[in-house]
Image (cartoon, helix red, strand yellow):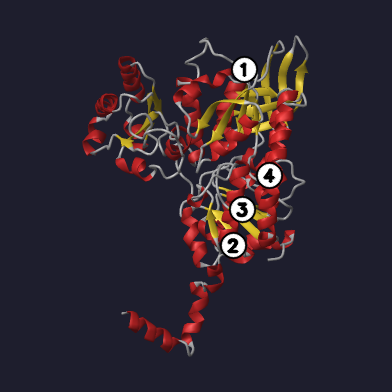
């Protein structure tokens, strides 16, 4: 499990940040992205995938979360 | 020198790499790249933030340097104790020229060196008692200090001293913040982790101390983050931001105080200059306090104008108008500077090798003077820095991460730039080769370089370095060698005798 931070960019897309490794990247796809179910498998621009426990859409961004690494790009 | 093509630059990298043993060559090859603006992700072309190879000459610092020297050190009304043997504190004392206002030794302590001066017995029996004692002495001798930070040097982590317990106890007795910082030098691969550790310690021990306290806010409150006031940089930036109508609540960390840092969570926008060293705390404030942050660049009129407009875009019409007014006001001054120096510097080439934000931020300033940056590199960058650099640099220019002494020398010998911007460790190597070098870590004892006023000084300094007549009169030692064998040899000997 890794601590990650998800923030919204100026154009409304999600951005992913992994403080431990100073890895900042765009989230290209997210399994669930609706008001009542948000999260699931997320795919990064660099090819890595992480899993966030599906939850209600966070009230505000950025938000720190726990995520499971499914497949890191590096 | 004329521009190299992509193939030529690639061939140059290969040639330089040839001297390494196989394993080292494979590793170093990942850190050297030819810039390609079409690449969106730097990790596809360059690897960064990795451990330096043993045996090569790196110019990186340590976590202690990143924490004490960069992030904590400039906070002027706190006392930063270098906890451990004396050398680390002494050799990092006041070298970075973080200017500040105040009476040193009374209410400000920026250029002083406080250390626990570890001896063998402290290593054997532990240094906690010594730390407690020295905190008491500080309180007696310097009662006007606002707080203490304990900057750990390597042995503290190795012998397992509990500086947190000592700090908590003493802070209670003294009723002043004492921040233990676990920035032992062996942590991480470079000073970069020290920045992160220091940011985290500010987050955990300082930032939330005034939450819930009253504060007379205005809609125009901002803070300047990641400007260390080297040679007065933060002042040159601050006047522009204030002139456009904003109120600067805090300066991190150059000429900054503990009170300013505690008040930062009340601002409306964080202006981030050095992304590498302070993005961590900006991200934290964005999450916890909902304060957006914005990277800006105050090197050279083009970038300053861009940045002022980007900052103003976060505020109302009054500020937007203010930004235009500031840009218009300094326009004639900038035109005069460029008219004076551009004809002398037009077409000159520069290679940079520094740390932090400069390898990409100063490119715009050089371009304003008609100069071209043909190679750039960072000592301790991460991939996100290179992501930002790729767009700034021209195609087929050279990128080098954590360059070794050998690589840098070879690149510069081959690419023959008119100016090198690097540190003091590189300065005399290249000046002996007959290539002018400006020390770009602390502006070669000049500055400020930020802001409009800084650009005038920047342009003058670059012109002074390049146009100095001494460079054409220098012959590097390796070129002198063959001449000694022929008829000039006896003359040289005779001269030697005269001197003797």
Q: How far apart are labels 2 and 4 at the CA level?
A: 21 Å
Q: How far apart are labels 1 and 4 at the CA level?
A: 29 Å
Query: Are both tags, 3 and 1, on one chain?
Result: yes
Q: Residues within 10 Å of mark 3 (few under 14, many from 20)?
A: many
Q: Quadrant of the N terminus of chain B?
A: bottom right
Residue B161: image quadrant is top left
Query: Are both tags, 1 and 4, on one chain?
Result: yes
Q: How crowded is mark 1: few (under 14 residues within 10 Å), some or many (20 or more)?
A: few
Chain letter of disc 3 in the image: B
Chain letter of disc 4 in the image: B
Q: Residue at x 48, y 90 (%)?
A: B487
Q: Nearer the viewer, residue A26 or B377?
A: B377
| Secondary element type, mark 1 | loop
Q: Quadrant of the C terminus of chain B?
A: bottom left
Left or right side of A63 for B153: left
Q: How far apart are labels 2 and 3 at the CA level?
A: 11 Å
Q: Mark 4 points at which residue?
A: B301
User: Residue B283, how many percent across, how many down?
Assistant: 60, 25
Q: How crowded is mark 4: few (under 14 residues within 10 Å), some or many (20 or more)?
A: many
Chain letter of disc 1 in the image: B
Circle nearer the N terminus (2, 3): 3
Q: Name the residue under label 3.
A: B459
Q: Nearer the viewer, residue B411 or B20?
A: B411
Circle nearer the N terminus (2, 1): 1
Query: Are both tags, 2 and 4, on one chain?
Result: yes
| Secondary element type, mark 3 | helix
User: Residue B159, how many percent across, how many down?
Assistant: 31, 32
Chain letter of disc 2 in the image: B
Q: Name the residue under label 1.
A: B218
Q: Mark 2 points at which residue?
A: B466
| Secondary element type, mark 4 | helix
């Amino acid at each position: 499990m890794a601590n990650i931070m998800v923030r919204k960019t100026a154009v409304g897309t999600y951005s992913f940040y992994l403080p431990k490794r100073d890895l900042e990247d765009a989230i290209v796809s997210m399994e669930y992205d609706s008001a009542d179910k948000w999260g699931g498998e997320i795919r990064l621009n660099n090819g890595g995938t992480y899993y966030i426990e599906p939850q209600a859409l966070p009230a505000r961004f950025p938000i720190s979360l726990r995520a499971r690494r499914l497949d890191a790009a590096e | 020198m004329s521009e190299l093509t992509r193939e030529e630059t690639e061939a140059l990298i290969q040639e330089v790499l040839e001297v390494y043993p196989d394993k080292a060559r494979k590793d170093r090859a990942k850190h050297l790249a030819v810039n390609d603006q079409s690449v969106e992700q730097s990790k596809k072309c360059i690897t960064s933030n990795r451990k330096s190879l043993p045996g090569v000459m790196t110019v990186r610092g340590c976590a202690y340097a990143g924490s004490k020297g960069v992030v904590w050190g400039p906070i002027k009304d706190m006392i930063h104790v270098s906890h451990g043997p004396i050398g680390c504190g002494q050799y990092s004392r006041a070298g970075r020229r973080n200017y500040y206002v105040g009476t040193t030794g009374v209410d400000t302590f920026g250029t002083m060196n406080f250390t626990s001066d570890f001896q063998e017995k402290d290593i054997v029996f532990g240094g906690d008692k010594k730390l407690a004692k020295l905190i008491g002495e500080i309180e007696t001798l310097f009662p006007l200090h606002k707080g203490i930070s304990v900057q750990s040097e390597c042995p503290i982590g190795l012998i397992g001293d509990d500086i947190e317990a000592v700090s908590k106890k003493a802070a209670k007795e003294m009723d002043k913040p004492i921040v233990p910082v676990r920035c032992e030098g062996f942590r991480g691969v470079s000073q970069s982790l020290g920045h992160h550790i220091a940011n985290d310690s500010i987050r955990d021990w300082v930032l939330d101390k005034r939450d819930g306290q009253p504060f007379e806010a205005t809609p125009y409150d901002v803070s300047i983050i990641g400007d260390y006031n080297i040679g007065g940089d933060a002042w040159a930036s601050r006047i522009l931001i204030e002139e456009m109508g904003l109120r600067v609540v805090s300066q991190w960390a150059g000429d900054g105080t503990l009170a300013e840092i505690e008040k930062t969570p009340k601002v409306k926008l964080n202006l981030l200059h050095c992304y590498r060293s302070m993005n961590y705390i900006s991200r934290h404030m964005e999450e916890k306090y909902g304060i957006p942050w914005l990277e800006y660049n105050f090197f050279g009129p083009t970038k300053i104008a861009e940045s002022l407009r980007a900052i103003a875009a976060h505020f109302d019409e009054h500020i937007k108008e203010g930004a235009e007014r500031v840009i218009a006001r300094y326009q004639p001054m900038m035109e005069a500077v460029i008219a004076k120096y551009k004809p002398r510097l037009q077409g000159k080439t520069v290679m940079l090798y520094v740390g932090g934000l400069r390898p990409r931020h100063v490119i715009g300033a050089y371009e304003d003077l008609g100069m071209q940056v043909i190679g750039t590199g960072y000592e301790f960058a991460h991939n996100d820095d290179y992501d930002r650099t790729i767009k700034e640099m021209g195609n087929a220019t050279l990128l080098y991460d954590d360059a070794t002494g050998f690589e840098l020398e070879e690149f510069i010998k081959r690419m023959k730039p008119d100016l090198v911007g690097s540190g003091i460790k590189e300065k005399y190597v290249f000046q002996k080769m007959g290539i002018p070098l400006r020390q770009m870590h602390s502006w070669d004892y000049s500055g400020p370089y930020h802001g409009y006023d800084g650009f005038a000084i920047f342009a003058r300094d670059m012109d002074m370095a390049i146009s100095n007549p001494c460079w054409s009169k220098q012959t590097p030692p390796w070129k002198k060698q063959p001449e000694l064998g022929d008829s000039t040899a006896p003359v040289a000997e005779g001269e030697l005798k005269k001197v003797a």
